[in-house]
Image (tube, rainbow, N blue to C red):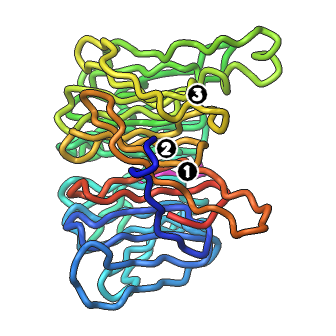
Amino acid sequence: ANESKSKQLLVLTEWLFAVAFSPNNTQVALGSRRRVLIMHVFSDDDRMDVTIKVRGGVVGLSFSPEGDILAMGGWDAMVSLIDPVTGDIFSRLEHDFMVASLSWSPDSQFIVTGSFDNHAYVWHVDSSEMRQQLTGHTGPVLGVQYSRDGTMIATGSGDATCKIWQPKSEEKQEDFCLIKSKPKFSVQLQYLSVCGRHAGIAHSSGTGTFYDLDTGAQLGSVRHPDEETSKEEEDAISAQIVHTLHCIAFAPDCSRIVTAGHDCTARVWDAKTKEELVVFRGHASELASAVFMALFSPDGTLIASVSNDKTIRVWDSFTGEEKICFEGNAPAEGSIEDTGFFFAIAWSPDGKGIGGRLYGNRCV
C-alpha cells in the first residue's frame, strides 16, 4: 500500500478477544481476559468510559439491535446482560459449560447461545429464561446466527455439521442438516453467514457452500484456486491448512459474497451465478500466508480484510482498489516481542470505523 495511506491504530495495553460496535455508532465494546471496556469513541458524548471486571476472559460481545443491552459471553460459562451506559450487569444466563458463540434475534427479545456442551440455547431476554435447548450436535457449537427475519437459527459445530432450526416452533429438533463431514476427511466449519433465506458456509476443505434455508437445497459453491503445493508439503502441513477458506460473508443486499482464504487473497463473487468478480491481492507478501477475514461495509461499497501481514486493508468492493491500510502497532525500540497479527474485524454501523482483533498482541 501507498505509505501515505497507512495509519496507526489505537493502541491498548492488554490482549483482546472481542470487539463490538453499538447500533447507533456511539460506543465500542472491547473484551479482554480481565475486563470489558465500553468506550465513547465516535461521538461528542462526554460520558465516562465504562469498565467491567470479568473472570477468566471474554469469548464474545454483541449489542442488542436496539443498542440498550450488551451481551457478554465468558469463559465462566455465563452470558452477562449489561447496561452499556452504566456498566451494570442486570442478568446472567447460566450455562453448564463455556459459551462459544451468541447472537441476538432481530427484535432484541431473544438470544441464542452456543456452548461447549454440544448444545445451543434460546433465551428470553426480559425473563432470562431458557426457552429452548437445540440438541443434535455432537461437538461444541462454535457459531450461531439468527436469520434476518428472526424465524430461523443456523448453528455450526466442531462435529463438522451446520444445522438450521425454527426456534419458535413446537418442534425442538432441527429441520435439516446442511453439511456433514466426509467419511475420510474431517471438514471443519470456519465461518457461517446468513442473508435473507440463504446461508453460506466456509470450511476447511477450501470450499464455500450455499444453501436455501427453506428447503435445505444446495445453491452452488465457490473455491479459491489451490496453491501450488507439492504432495510432500501438503502431507507435512495438512491439506486442511493449505486449502482452508477462513471466512465467507454476504453484501448487505445479498447480491455479492466475499471470501477470505489461505491463498492470501480475498475474493468477491456474484451470489446468484457464483462468478468471480474481483480478487484482492494486496496482502500477499513474504509476511503473509493467509487472509483470515473479509467483510463488506454496511453500505456494501467497501471491504475490510485482515491477514498475518499485520495489517487491516480497506478496498473498493467493486474495483478492487486499495483505499487505505491500517498497520498494527510496532514493538518498542530494542524489543524483540512479536507484535502479532490481525485475525478478526468489525465495522461500525455507519461504515466509518473498524475494530480489529490481534492474535498475540495488545491493540485494536
Residues at marks 1 and 3 touching, judged by CB atoms closer than 8 Å? no
Q: Foreground: 155 or 313?
A: 313
**Front position in the image: 103 or 276:** 276
C-beta proximity under 8 Å, tags 2 and 1: yes
Q: Which residue occupies 55% across, 67% down?
A: 58
Q: Residue at x 36, y 57 (%)?
A: 354
Q: Residues within 10 Å of mark 3 (few under 14, many from 20)?
A: many
Q: Position of residue 287 (x, y in %)?
A: 65, 38
Amino acid bearing label 2? Val
**Mark 2 near mark 3, Cβ–Cβ under 8 Å?**
no
Q: Name the residue under label 1.
A: 342
Secondary element at tag 2: strand
Quadrant of the rendering where the N terminus is positioned: top left
Residue carrying label 2: 306
User: Of callouts 2 and 3, which one flags the residue occurring earlier in the amino acid sequence?
Assistant: 3
Q: How far apart are marks 1 and 3 (CA)?
A: 14 Å
Front one among 300 and 18: 300
Residue 197 placed where, x, y %? 22, 30
Q: Is residue 93 visible?
A: no
Residue span colored magenta: 113-117
Residue ID at (58%, 27%): 262
Name the disc covering residue 262, or none.
Answer: 3
